[in-house]
Image: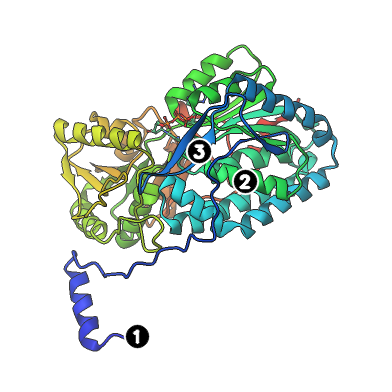
């Protein structure tokens, strides 16, 4: 129905006043076609098996706190079975003609596309992220990773000329809860393309999309044992990475656990890649297109509730434009819609778990106590579930915890600078080094900054862009090794 002139004028007036949010009718995604099983086993040797531990734990929807399913808690015997199944599958998988390996991977990529709606819903219900993000980002990118790496399977000698690339064996992979299926794809796709077999442990709070992926492996008729999935908590992850049958470990998660794993593996000869935390600077110069920058800032920190290792959680603004930029940003924040993650209009979904919510609350309190100025738009939080409003801190000093520690929530700390050199110094003043963003009209300044920023990824006039062809990874306490692109194959190969 077309709006009358009067209605249009009224809406424009409300929008111009800043607080005027367009009212949207609810647009919930239909979920009746999705079958979440009441209980899941472990995916070992090509089939779902009951856990030796006989233990299961619930996984809940963080937006409603309702139980979705029970998943198995793998113990040492279960992990050992999974690693042995992967070990048995390795010989034939690594000797299979590379183009046949690719065929399985193309099949997996296509099945992810075919089951995309179901996967997006499962991801959103299990993790709390808005459906528009799981539908438009997580699932398509996961499929794209399998498609991209399938293309490399029979071209490894071209990827690494004059070397003799050989697979390593069984890869033990541990992933976090912020992008469950996407992280699974980042881990499994390059490993399989290189001829390895895998045992993967998803995060305790988001195991369900990995269970659907297990079904996809069976649908694709992937040879038994090439992919194995063991669910459980941190203990299961530790059993996996420390298992002597594992030749290569890939971990994404907190810096603290990354350090524990590195200590545990020292001297074992296992190959290791770590993708850990971040505290990225998103740097806006006075010549940047401000409206575009505001969108990039919002995307940088409020995408996926800020549960993003490369989130632009420290905004560095050139002093001369700090005031107008803050005004625009605050106005934009008031238009973000927080609520039901399954609603297609939702911008900010639920916080992944109670523990994560408490961590965010604690850090935000520390920001107020240390003297930063808090801004939160008016925003009604649902009664059940775990929620945190989009939050902005100004008057932040570099020494505050909110400027130094990874909050992993929708919380932005704003600092200012005067010169490019000061921007670089402040941006690099962090133990992390995963990503950074630069907003400016000048190409030369982008290059000047990118050379000096100690970050694995530097985005220019954009933020949070991902592509399977592009390597991703960190410096310093953000870890080491790269995922994505040709670089992402190297850690899964013996190139000597
Ligand atoms: P963790 O690092 O604990 O979890 C990541 C994965 O590692 C999970 O699968 C976890 O299992 C598993 N794990 C935990 N302990 C061990 C261990 N000793 N050996 C092997 N695997 C283990 O992150 P959290 O979920 O506890 O989140 C805490 C903080 O970490 C967040 O607030 C955030 O700051 C940061 N984080 C960073 C991520 C990133 O992408 N850089 C991702 C996730 C968190 P389980 O889930 O069962 O505990």
Marks 3 and 2: which is nearer the front? 3
Rate crowding at label 1 as few (under 14), some (14 to 19) or many (20 or more) other CA atoms within 10 Å. few
Task: State the residue at coordinates (22%, 76%).
Answer: 11
Question: What x and y, as percent, mark residue 311?
Answer: 39, 43
Query: Label 2's element?
Result: helix
Question: What x and y, as percent, mark residue 402?
Answer: 26, 34
CA–CA distance between discs 1 and 3? 45 Å
**Which of pointers 1 and 3 lies earlier in the amino acid sequence?**
1
Q: Which quarter of the image is occupied by the N terminus?
A: bottom left
Report if the beta carbon of the residue with label 3 is closer than 8 angstroms to ligand 1: no
Marks 1 and 3 in Cβ contact (< 8 Å)? no
Closer-to-camera residue (61/425): 61
Q: Can the viewer see residue 168 in this picture?
A: no
CA–CA distance between discs 1 and 2? 42 Å
Marks 1 and 2 in Cβ contact (< 8 Å)? no
Q: Is residue 412 above or below residue 172?
A: below
Report if the beta carbon of the residue with label 2 is closer than 8 angstroms to ligand 1: no
Rate crowding at label 2 as few (under 14), some (14 to 19) or many (20 or more) other CA atoms within 10 Å. many
Rate crowding at label 3 as few (under 14), some (14 to 19) or many (20 or more) other CA atoms within 10 Å. some
Q: Dividing the image into four equal quarters, which quarter contains ligand 1?
A: top left
Residue tagged by mark 2?
A: 213
Task: State the residue at coordinates (48%, 40%).
Answer: 206
Question: What x and y, as percent, mark residue 490?
Answer: 67, 34
Marks 1 and 3: which is nearer the front? 3
Q: Is residue 101 above or below residue 433?
A: below
Task: State the residue at coordinates (64%, 13%).
Answer: 268
Q: Is residue 6 left or right of residue 241?
A: left
Residue tagged by mark 1?
A: 1
In the rendered structure, find residue 70 and report the number of the disc placed on it: 3
């Amino acid at each position: 129905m077309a709006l009358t002139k009067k209605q249009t004028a009224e809406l424009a007036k409300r929008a111009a006043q800043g607080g005027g949010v367009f009212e949207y009718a609810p647009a919930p995604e239909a979920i009746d076609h999705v079958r979440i099983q009441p209980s899941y086993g472990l995916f070992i040797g090509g089939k779902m098996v009951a856990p030796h531990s006989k233990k299961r734990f619930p996984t809940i929807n963080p937006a409603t706190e309702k139980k979705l399913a029970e998943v198995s808690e793998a113990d040492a015997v279960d992990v050992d079975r999974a690693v042995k199944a992967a070990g048995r599958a390795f010989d034939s998988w690594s000797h299979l003609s590379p183009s046949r390996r690719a065929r399985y991977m193309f099949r997996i990529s296509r099945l992810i596309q075919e089951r995309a709606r179901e996967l997006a819903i499962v991801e959103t219900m299990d993790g709390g992220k808005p459906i528009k993000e799981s539908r438009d980002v997580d699932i398509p990118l996961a499929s794209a990773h399998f498609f991209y790496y399938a293309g490399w399977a029979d071209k490894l000698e071209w990827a690494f000329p004059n070397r003799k690339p050989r697979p390593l064996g069984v890869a033990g992979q541990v992933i976090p809860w912020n992008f469950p299926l996407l992280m699974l794809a980042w881990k499994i796709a390059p490993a399989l393309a290189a001829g390895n077999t895998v045992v993967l442990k998803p995060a305790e709070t988001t195991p369900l999309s990995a269970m659907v992926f297990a079904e996809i492996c069976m649908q694709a008729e992937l040879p038994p044992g090439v992919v194995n999935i063991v669910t459980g908590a941190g203990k299961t992850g530790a059993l996996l990475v420390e298992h002597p049958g594992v030749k290569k470990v890939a971990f994404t998660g907190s810096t603290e656990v990354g350090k524990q794993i590195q200590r545990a593996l020292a001297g074992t000869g296992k190959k290791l890649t770590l993708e850990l935390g971040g505290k990225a600077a998103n740097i806006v110069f006075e010549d940047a297109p401000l409206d575009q920058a505001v969108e990039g800032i919002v995307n940088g920190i409020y995408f996926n509730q800020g549960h993003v290792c490369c989130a632009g959680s420290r905004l560095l603004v050139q002093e001369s434009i700090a005031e107008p930029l803050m005004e625009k940003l605050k106005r934009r924040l008031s238009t973000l819609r927080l609520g039901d993650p399954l609603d297609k209009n939702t911008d900010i979904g639920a916080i992944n778990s109670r523990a994560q919510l408490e961590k965010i609350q604690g850090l935000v309190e520390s920001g107020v106590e240390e003297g930063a100025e808090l801004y939160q738009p008016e925003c009604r939080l649902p009664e059940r579930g775990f929620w945190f409003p989009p939050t902005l801190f100004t008057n932040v000093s570099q020494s505050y915890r909110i400027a130094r520690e990874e909050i992993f929530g929708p919380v932005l700390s704003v600092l200012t600078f005067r010169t490019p050199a000061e921007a670089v110094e402040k941006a690099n003043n962090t133990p992390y080094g995963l990503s950074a963003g630069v907003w400016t009209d000048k190409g030369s300044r982008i290059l000047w900054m990118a050379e000096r920023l100690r970050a694995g990824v530097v985005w220019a006039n954009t933020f949070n862009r991902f592509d399977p062809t592009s390597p991703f990874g960190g410096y310093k306490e953000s870890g080491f090794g790269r995922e994505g692109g040709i670089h992402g194959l190297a850690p899964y190969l013996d190139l000597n």
